[in-house]
Image (cartoon, helix red, strand yellow):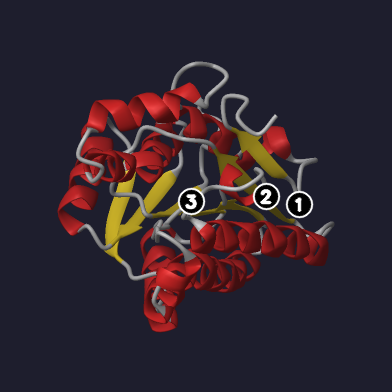
């Protein structure tokens, strides 16, 4: 038996990186998983991989910044699987700028729309689906260690968005404590994902940039998406039934 047998999970940003690792592991542990993203090709590939190994999964195109998209996706998930028990608000982007004076308002708003508005809409419509099913549930919001370290140069908009996620998580947890809904956040450190690869390649010297990231990690390496997925599994399962409103840092010791 899996830790999530009979459960239904929705993972946003599930086409690659942390989201894909989460979807795969939740399915391995028995959950029926709805994967959503805007990268349809990659999303379909991850879904096919889950199904090929005996898991239950469906992929949905989904722009997390649009409320009508959330309404549609939630309806399709409930129609396909009958309920929703686990929501992983993982979709996110990072937009850097040389300084705050060099960042456009449009870029700042785009950063917040995905990382903050997307989480708000996910929680809103996820809660509606969970309460309709009457079984409670677990909401897991992906923040970042960037929300709590001393400061990350040139990433002020990203840091602000991820700090907002923690604030929302704690308030939501307080609102629903004792009502069957738990809400927690995860704060990853530097994880080796396709989005990080793009950032490193953009420097023009991938190896040097990667070495600089590794140098700030006390453990001497970058994290793996599968390590974040293991924490998501814990928070999604009954093993964490006494845990809510917590921002769980998993960063190789960077924030210490």
Check the image and name the residue furthest to the left: 41
| Contact, mark 2 vs mark 1 (Cβ under 8 Å) | yes
**153 vs 117, nearest the viewer:** 153
Residue 124, position as x, y percentages in the image: 59, 73
Question: What residue is at 64 percent from the left and 49 percent from the top?
Answer: 185
| Quadrant in the picture for the C terminus | top right
Residue 93, position as x, y percentages in the image: 39, 58
- Mark nearest the camera among 1 and 3 is 1
Please tell me which of labels 2 and 3 falls first in the chain: 3
Residue underneath mark 1 = 245
- Identify the secondary structure beneath mark 3: strand
Please tell me which of labels 2 and 1 falls first in the chain: 2
Label at residue 66: none
Local packing at callout 1 (Cα closer than 10 Å; few below 14, some 14-19, many 20+) is many
**38 vs 163, nearest the viewer:** 163
Residue underneath mark 3 = 8
Q: Is residue 222 visible?
A: no
Q: Please give left or right for residue 202 compared with residue 246 in the image.
A: left
Residue 34 drawn above or below residue 112: above
- Identify the secondary structure beneath mark 1: loop
Please tell me which of labels 1 and 3 falls first in the chain: 3
Real-space Cα distance between discs 2 and 1?
5 Å
Residue 87 drawn above or below residue 234: below
Real-space Cα distance between discs 2 and 3?
18 Å
| Contact, mark 2 vs mark 3 (Cβ under 8 Å) | no
- Identify the secondary structure beneath mark 2: strand
Label at residue 184: 2
Q: Quadrant of residue 233?
A: top right
Question: What residue is at 47 percent from the left and 31 percent from the top?
Answer: 29
Q: Please give left or right for residue 14 compared with residue 222 in the image.
A: left
Q: Quadrant of residue 125?
A: bottom right
Q: Is residue 35 visible?
A: yes
């Amino acid at each position: 038996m899996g830790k999530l047998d009979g459960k239904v999970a929705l993972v946003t940003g599930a086409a690659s990186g942390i989201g894909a690792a989460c979807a795969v592991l939740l399915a391995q542990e028995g959950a029926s998983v709805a994967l959503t993203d805007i990268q349809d090709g990659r999303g379909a590939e991850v879904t096919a991989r889950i199904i090929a190994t005996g898991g239950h999964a469906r992929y949905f195109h989904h722009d997390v910044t649009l409320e009508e998209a959330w309404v549609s996706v939630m309806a399709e998930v409930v129609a396909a699987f009958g309920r929703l028990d686990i929501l992983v608000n993982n979709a996110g982007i990072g937009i850097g700028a040389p300084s705050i004076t060099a960042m456009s308002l449009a870029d700042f708003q785009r950063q917040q729309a995905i990382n903050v508005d997307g989480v708000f809409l996910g929680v809103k419509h996820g809660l509606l689906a969970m309460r309709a099913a009457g079984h409670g549930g677990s909401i897991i919001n992906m923040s970042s260690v960037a929300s709590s370290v001393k400061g990350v140069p040139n990433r002020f908009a990203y840091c602000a968005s991820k700090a907002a996620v923690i604030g929302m998580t704690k308030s939501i947890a307080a609102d629903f404590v004792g009502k069957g809904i738990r809400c927690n956040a995860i704060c990853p450190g530097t994880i080796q994902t396709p989005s990080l690869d793009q950032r490193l390649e953009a420097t023009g010297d991938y190896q040097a940039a990667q070495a600089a990231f590794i140098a700030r990690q006390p453990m001497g390496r970058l994290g793996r998406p599968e390590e974040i997925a293991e924490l998501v599994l814990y928070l999604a399962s009954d093993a964490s039934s006494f845990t809510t409103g917590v921002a769980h840092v998993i960063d190789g010791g960077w924030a210490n």
